[in-house]
Amino acid sequence: LSNLALETDVSPTRGGTDRRSAGERKSIGPEHLRPLPDSLTFDIRNIQAMTEIKTQIGYARAWVRLALEKKLLSRHLKTLLSDTTLL
């Protein structure tokens, strides 16, 4: 056990790598990330780009799940229902 304690000692010269402390790490915080677009067309394009979906019902389910996850289902439905040419 005494040998293990000596071998786990990490010194700056051992290994030759530059180790940064937790304060010096470069992290991406919320202030650096842009929010995803919340438009209906953006969500539909993302769903249509999914290659795992094989049926039209699968696309509809994926769209509903995505809209629910983003808490935008009511807004998307209002947008779709307000367009009388689609109805």
Image (cartoon, helix red, strand yellow):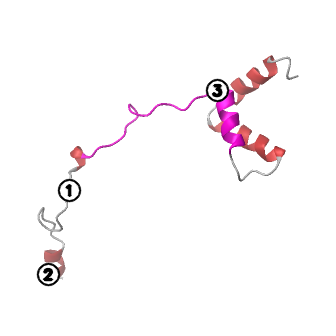
Q: Are marks 3 and 2 in contact (CB under 8 Å)?
A: no
Mark 3 or 2: the one toward you: 3
Asked where in the image residue 18 lies, by quadrant, the reply is: bottom left
Q: Which mark is residue 45?
A: none
Nearer the observer, 36 or 23: 36
Position above or below: 35 against 19: above
Mark 3 and mark 2: Cα distance apart in space = 62 Å
Name the residue rendered at 72%, 43% in the picture. Answer: 62
Position above or below: 8 against 21: below
Mark 1 and mark 2: Cα distance apart in space = 25 Å
Identity, as a three-letter code, of the amino acid under mark 1: Arg
Q: Which residues are magenta?
A: 25-49
Query: Which quadrant: the N terminus?
Result: bottom left
Q: Which residue was labeled with disc 1?
A: 19
Mark 3 vs mark 2: which is more N-terminal? 2
Q: Which residue was labeled with disc 2?
A: 2
Q: Which residue was labeled with disc 3?
A: 39
- 33 left or right of 47? left
x and y percentages locating residue 64 in the rendered image: 73, 38
